[in-house]
Amino acid sequence: MSGPAIALMLVSMIVIWGGLAGAIWFLARRPERDDLPPGGEDEHVDPAAS
C-alpha cells in the first residue's frame, strides 16, 4: 500500500472508532431519561380504523 492510502485508512479508522467511543462515552454519562410521564410507547392511533 502507498503512503497516502495508509494515511487515509488511519484517518478513516480514527473517525469511525472515535465516533463509536464518543457515543459510548455520551451514553455512559447521560443514560436514557426515566423522569418522563408514562405513555408514548405503542400508542399509535390509526385514523383509518375509526
Image: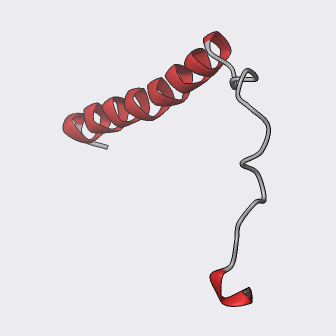
The reply, left or right, for residue 27 in relation to residue 50 is left
Above or below, 34 against 41 in this view is above
The reply, left or right, for residue 46 in relation to residue 1 is right
Q: Residue at x 73, y 21 (%)?
A: 35
Of residue 2 and residue 26, the one placed in the foreground of this image is 26
Of residue 1 and residue 33, the one placed in the foreground of this image is 33
* Colour convention: secondary structure
Of residue 36 and residue 4, the one placed in the foreground of this image is 36
From the image, which quarter does the C terminus lie in?
bottom right
**In the rendering, at what x and y percent does residue 29 appear?**
62, 10
Above or below, 11 against 22 in this view is below
From the image, which quarter does the N terminus lie in?
top left
**In the rendering, at what x and y percent does residue 8 appear?**
27, 37
* Outermost residue to the top: 29
**In the rendering, at what x and y percent does residue 18 appear?**
46, 24
Q: Residue at x 78, y 59 (%)?
A: 42
Of residue 36 and residue 13, the one placed in the foreground of this image is 36
Total numbered labels:
0
* Outermost residue to the front: 50
Q: Quadrant of residue 6?
A: top left
Q: Quadrant of residue 21?
A: top right
The reply, left or right, for residue 38 in relation to residue 4 is right
Q: Residue at x 56, y 18 (%)?
A: 26
**In the rendering, at what x and y percent does residue 5 appear?**
26, 42
